[in-house]
Amino acid sequence: MLCAVRRAVDDGELRVVVPGRAVVTVPGAGGCGDYATNIALQLARPAGQPSRRVAEVLRPYLLGADGIGDVVVSGPGFLNISLHGAQAQAQERAHAHGSASLVREILGSGVRYGYADGPTGQVVQLHAPHEVRAVVVMDVVARLLRSQGALVRTSCAARPERAWAEVLGAGVDAYGTPDAPAPLDVNVRPVPAAPVDPVSLGRDAGRWALLHAAAHDRPRAAADLLAQRESNPLFRVRYAHARTRALSRNAADLGFDAHPGDVQDVRELEIVLADHPRILAAAATRRAPDRLARQLLAVADAVSPLLATVLPRGEEKPSAAHRARLALAEAAGTVLAGGLTLLGIDAPDHL
């Protein structure tokens, strides 16, 4: 929910301060779907717009999120959300196993959480035109497919520019037109990056600019991606990861470490972590790295409220609750690190 608000703010659709939390409940009288929220009513006054208009602005951002089947605006501006079956299954899984079991699974798998158990026998040939965004997207699609057990080979219509490999870290297995009787079909063709120059942004920001937008949307490789502020989605993801690592170091200085246990009031975080394997599989199957980028934003936004509660305050002694919250934060950091690695973006421990 807050991710949708931030995206609307980032796109200039709303001019508000993103709230720290959004209340999501079961639909009331006159509502429908699985969940409902009054976030549009909450934002109407600061936005200077009618609440129903705010709800209509937020609706397409929610519809673009993974797992959302439908969003209906009712009454003065309530947003009624219906989930796809797979997202509902992730909720059931998070509820059935609890945070302790989920955290153990993530920490046990490490950055390979959500990967296939082994090779599936699937063989995929990816072929891209000689265009920077296509080559970077193909590089990440190959990583995603390999994470799901596929054997992948990549090729480009012509030799990629040196900067695409040296700056953006995107290479190919082969290039040129094959001499085979049946030429390869171009099957990775996102909207070109031009007139944007992602190379000027460097590897991390340049790759994010090309990957965060859906393939049918033109990327926005703005210099804002280099700014260390909350409105920069890449910074939010990397900062959330760095904070989880800092918490582990600080906890060690205080003489305690992580131990999985049940944590209260972290439902949204549990759901997005439990749904991560499905997102990886869907991003690979649909050849859509933007799905993974949005997932990492959802994890970063969901873990942020938890981070301030991990360490003891004042004279407070570390307790089982602190250890459980630390373990959950470390699990979220592990998912962020694994996802950034698949996108070919650095996940620094210090930021």
Image (cartoon, grey):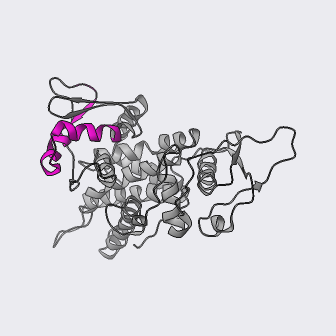
Residue 146 against residue 36 in the figure, above or below: below
Q: Relative to the observer, which residue lies in front, 293 or 266?
A: 293
**Res 254 visible:** yes
Residue 43 within the magenta-colored segment of the rendering: yes
Residue at the extreme front of the image, as rendered: 195
Q: Which image quadrant: the C terminus? A: bottom left
Relative to residue 206, is residue 89 drawn left or right? left
- Which x, y percent locates residue 240? 36, 62
Marks counted in the figure total: 0
Region of the chain picked out in magenta, as a range? 32-61
Q: Relative to the observer, which residue lies in front, 26 or 32?
A: 32
Residue at the extreme left of the image, as rendered: 45
- Residue 79, picture quadrant: top left
Relative to residue 140, is residue 229 drawn left or right? left
- Residue at 36 percent across and 56 percent down: it is 300
Residue 217 against residue 260 in the figure, above or below: above
Q: Which secondary structure dominates the residues rendered in magenta?
A: helix
Relative to residue 348, is residue 247 drawn left or right? left
Relative to residue 340, is residue 29 drawn left or right? left
Q: Which image quadrant: the N terminus? A: top left
Residue at the extreme bottom of the image, as rendered: 253
- Residue 42, picture quadrant: top left
Residue 339 within the magenta-colored segment of the rendering: no
Residue 216 against residue 347 in the figure, above or below: above
- Which x, y percent locates residue 326? 33, 61
**Res 338 visible:** no
- Which x, y percent locates residue 41? 15, 41
- Which x, y percent locates residue 28? 16, 27
- Residue at 68 percent across and 60 percent down: it is 171
- Residue at 56 percent across and 60 percent down: it is 344
- Residue at 58 percent across and 48 percent down: it is 144
